[in-house]
Image (tube, helix red, strand yellow):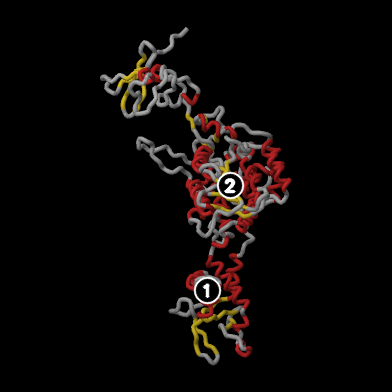
Amino acid sequence: MARRPTGAALGRRCGGRAALHRDGDGALDRLRPGGRGHRRRAGARARGGGRTGAGAGARPRRAAEPVEGSSPPLAPLGANVSSTNAKDIVRYLTDCERRRAGERPRMRSVTHLGWAEGALSAFMPYDAEGGEVRFDPSPDEAVKARPFMEAAGTLEGWVAGMAPVRSDSPAFRCVLAASFASAMVALLGVQTFIVYLWGRSRSGKTPTLKAAGSVWGDPTEGSDSYFRTFADTPKSIVRAAALFHDIPVIIDELQSKGAPGGQASKRQIVEDLLYSLSLGHERGALNSDRSMMRAGSWRSLTIATGEIPIVGDSTQQGAANRTLELNAEPFSDVRAAQEMHRLVVRQHGTAGRAFVGALRRNPAEFYERQFAQVRDAVGSIACGHPQADNIALLAFADALAEYYVFAPGTGWQACLDGALSMALWAFGNATGAEGGDTDLKAIQFLAEWLVGNKIHFDDYCENDRLERWGAIEEKGCAAGFYWFVFSSVLERALSSGNFDRAKTLRRMDEEGLLVCDSGHRYTKQKRFRNAGRVYCVCIDNEALEAFLERTAAPAAVIAAQGGAPC
């Protein structure tokens, strides 16, 4: 029988070095730093003697009490570390390190999920077995990673359940594309952002969110599940994002978030949380010893749902720019939504494995070139929408998911066309469409105003007791005509639509829609019958029509240049 170690526990408390010794009757003696006098027996304290410990009210440490500061990594792993053997364990491990350090096998390891060493490298935990990099999280993080360790069902079964809903519901397709897009943030070097779907209750938002989570792992609810809600603390959600790293964070039920200050306070808390998630890293903080605390980081999207909007008039511009807010109802049939709940329990984790494996077939440069083409095409139909780049990422991910997962063998151009249709739907249903290119909207408004009030520009309008607002003059050497609009009338018209006159005319001049006299920036002289010469804003009608056709929401096509993905 091995002899039980009798070494004393060695710890640091209150900045000093204190040693504990065992005397003959089994009680523990504490020596103050320096070791001179003041030996205080733990047993004396129990009999009403002097105080024991580092400070007033401290209780005596029992012989078998675990030592928290001696070996922090060992206790959570189940090692039997106590005050009686801590010193011997430290000595043993130190000897092993000194004598066997050169013989121990060494492996690189990471403590987060997703891409281990950059985009297109090993993807954790899918490639954790047999690879050059190990997935080695802390014990509490290992529990949180459990939903991703094993897949359920088959890829064919998952696609069979998802494909019909994806083809029928653009909202469902957008959220699913956001899930695939999360793994491409690091690959393309784009900014992380939030995809927030909101709508009425019982419209299928939660099963849509679970479907997005089922791409990567088990999205069912539970204390250690992948599925999160806004009722969780912001710190726990941010720490989960650091663990997931490239896998999207899914958060449900915005309305479940409680706040002491009512709706305004709730909105502020949620905005702060989403802004923190969009930054891609935790806030900096200090340890108790004033050293910098390790801050986690991530390169993933956040997908959230709720029954109320997040982005409002008072929302910080930074948070609004990083939140793609969609107002839609993914499911029209409650029974289909309930079936999705059951499907993700049986089928999950297969699509992410297939998608990541397929991405490795091409170099990163190929995806960068293809994404640039998609971004240009989506930008041409965005009309200045602030979420254009974010929607372009979803469109590119949707095309790749169609090509690799949902319909392998489909032509790449057909996948791009379907992705562009989804992008058009997203622009029409995303908050912020009203805050796009205001100059373009002002020109569109002005064109409609001119056509609707053409009678006020007729030479004989005054005979009908109508106010004259300008004139129409045919072009002498070409087909078409010019609009001559009195400056005061034009300013009044634009003000009625809440548009700025100077800003609108500057854009029209840049686009070549105005005809101006030399020395006059936006006006041209026009002679009126019985009124002399008047400086008016002269608009080329044919140039205006060509401009509106050019900027109309399109028949844009993403040209598949550079070949299809492998």
What count of labels does the image hold?
Answer: 2
Tell me if residue 133 can be seen.
no
- Tag 2: Cα neighbours inside 10 Å, few (<14), some, or many (≥20)? some
Residue located at (58% from left, 46% from top): 256
Tell me the element at label 1: helix
Front position in the image: 67 or 155: 67
Front position in the image: 99 or 249: 249
Identify the residue position indicated by label 1 in the image: 495
134 above or below 22? below
360 above or below 434? above
Tell me the element at label 2: helix
Identify the residue position indicated by label 2 in the image: 256
Residue located at (55% from left, 35% from top): 123
Looking at the image, which residue sits at the far front? 48
| Quarter of the rendering occupied by the C terminus | top right
- Point out residue 229 in the picture as x, y percentages from the top left corner: 57, 43
- Point out residue 472 in the picture as x, y percentages from the top left corner: 59, 82
- Point out residue 391 in the picture as x, y percentages from the top left corner: 57, 53
Q: Nearer the viewer, mark 1 or mark 2?
A: 2
Looking at the image, which residue sits at the far top? 1
Distance between the Cα atoms at labels 1 and 2? 42 Å
- Point out residue 497 in the picture as x, y percentages from the top left corner: 55, 71
Q: Amino acid at mark 2?
A: Ser
Q: Amino acid at mark 1?
A: Ser
Residue located at (54% from left, 73% from top): 513
Mark 2 or mark 1, which is nearer the start of the sequence? 2
41 above or below 397? above
471 above or below 191? below
Tell me if residue 10 can be seen.
yes
Front position in the image: 124 or 142: 142
